[in-house]
Amino acid sequence: MSLTDASRARRLARPVAALGLGLVTCVTGFAAPAQAADAATLTGVILGVGADETQRMVTWYSSADTVQAAQIAPAAQVVNGEFPAGASSFSAVGGANIATSGGYNRHATLTGLAENTTYSYHVGSDGNWSKTYTFKTQDFDGEYDFLFLGDPQIGASGNVANDQAGWADTLDVATKANPDAEILVSGGDQVETANTESQWNAFLAPEQLRQVPYAATIGNHDVGGKAYEQHLATPNTDRSASYYVNGNPTSNTSGGDYWYMYKDVLFIDLNSNSYTSSSGGGGDEAHLSYVTDVITKHGADAKYKVLVYHHSIYSPASHAKDADNKVRRVDFPTTFSKLGVDLVLQGHDHAYTRSYLIKNGAKADADEQPGAADVYPGPGGVLYVTANSASGSKYYDITAPDNSGTSGAGNGPDPLDPTRYWYNSVQNQEHTRTYVKVKVRNDQLVVENIRSEANVGSTVDKVTVHPYHGEGQQIQVRVPKAAPGEFGWTIDGKNGLVDLGTAKDNDGKYLGATGSINPITVKDTRSSLSPWSISAAVGDFKDADKTFSGSFLGWTPAVATAGAGAKAGTAVESGLNGGEGLSVSRTLGQADPGHEKGEAKLAADLDLKIPSSVDQGSYRATLTITALSS
Ligand SMILES: [Fe+2]
């Protein structure tokens, strides 16, 4: 008997697998004593994302160059605005603002946050603290929602007050409708004029920006000054010359690429203003190196990979045919497909677009229908979304396709509806403010564009992305924090995640979870009637740097549909009490020499038993399937 070739193994194999969980952390903030009272005026406070769900960053302006900090404590311990003696203090860093901004900027990183806690915080120094603000943390693991907000561009209408009102109303409507949304992701262009502080003040006015972390994105209207960087500190930010449009980070310009991991979603945010090296920066090539590097280092820890940048490459309106966007449209997509990016969030064209799944710069599946409710990216399919204006300061009307082609840089028509661009499944412009809600689910990303005025809360578009799980089967089980929780199951027949749900305690002896693999169909119509077997082994279960052995997984194979002489393999017990379980290759099914021709469906019930000592988390493992025949 010999190994079949890869393509045969692939045909026979349909994957399985994994699970995940979160961990409890406690506040371990270090004390950085603030100095004596000073007269600094503290303004523009904004809460930002940190490097992961256990962190936040706070940024503000100060009128004086004094030693400052952010102080934080569980809200329950803050009485009448008085922080407890044990409050954590995080030293602020920063520098002098450019002359047109005046004053100084400060930011501090809050680390070691605990799950499911409401915190109070303020910034400044002893005797001169800002107002007290609050934010809450939620489970550090599992499903969550975030909101994506396009181009507030305060001042674009010519009336800052009107733009501020629209921005404030969208934030108000969106956060009231989604009180548990965990991040406000920016599509860029916070303001109309980069260094105009009155516009920044209007942008920063809504209280939600001190309550829900904001993930900043730089737009073309932000890039021409330092105010963007002064106001919006971001984590893991690479401020190398390559990520600045002019290659000069110390000039009066903002830039940098950054990334963060939030509850198993890897976000990478790019300064798309820099797209060509001819202006001095590293252009798209530098961004692609950055994205590749970050995904190579951290992609394996992520269940989803989301890119964010300002200049939409698949948009429907005024900027659709821009020469610079055509460059990006050629430069970006193939690498994004290759790297397994799930979702790209963009702005700039002030009109809503949801693309078809795009693979290597072309429509992945010619048969994907406009407005499809469910999409299946397979290997390399990427969904691109462009947000409309969140403030209503400016809208661009939809433009018509031309004859420049239906792939790559082309702006040609969609054969399924020639009024739309070839790359757009949905394009919409109602001159109505909207925001995009993204639901991060166990085995789905749900993207919904929602109106924040006129028919408030109504849906413009909604699509569910069903991620690709590769050629093996991915198995998932969620290990609960302490007490056992409820089970949840999702098996969709399209090689969806094999979700073992939340493991249940078994009299304190072990945590148990069960499920079934996605069935495997075996077809053998050869005249040789040669024997065959299908076997599989599972790797370790992992959640970031936590792991447990695949030997804890056992199974009971079965022939679900008889044929091709199929016989089920022998049941294998979990290795909880010794033994290797499915960590070594085991037979799922096989047929003896001279078997009948035909087709069989092989199934297996999975039985996971893990020690009660395994840390909470959402662990995944891959079941690798091997086909053997002579
Ligand atoms: Fe823009």
Image (cartoon, grey):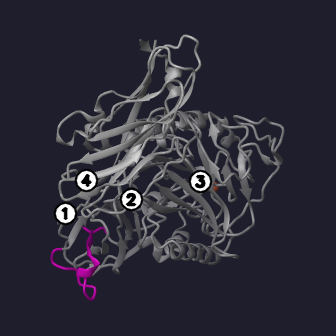
Against 188, residue 14 (above or below) is: above
Residue located at (56% from left, 70% from top): 199
For badge 1, the amino acid type reads Thr
Name the residue carrying label 2: 487
**Residue wearing tag 4:** 511
Foreground pick, 495 / 205? 495
Tell me the SS state at disc 2. loop
- For the residues labelled 1 and 3, the Cα–Cα distance comes to 39 Å
Q: Secondary structure at mark 3?
A: strand
Return the residue at label 3. 464
- The residue lying toward the viewer, choosing from 184 and 165, is 184
Tag 2 and tag 4, C-beta contact below 8 Å: no
Q: Are marks 1 and 2 in contact (CB under 8 Å)?
A: no
For marks 4 and 3, the one nearer the N-term is 3
Real-space CA distance between mark 2 and mark 4, rounded to the nearest whole angstrom: 13 Å
Tell whether 626 sits left or right of 418: left
Location of residue 577 by image quarter: top left
Q: For ligand 1, tell me if the residue under mark 4 lies within 8 Å.
A: no
Q: Earlier in the sequence, mark 1 or mark 3?
A: 1
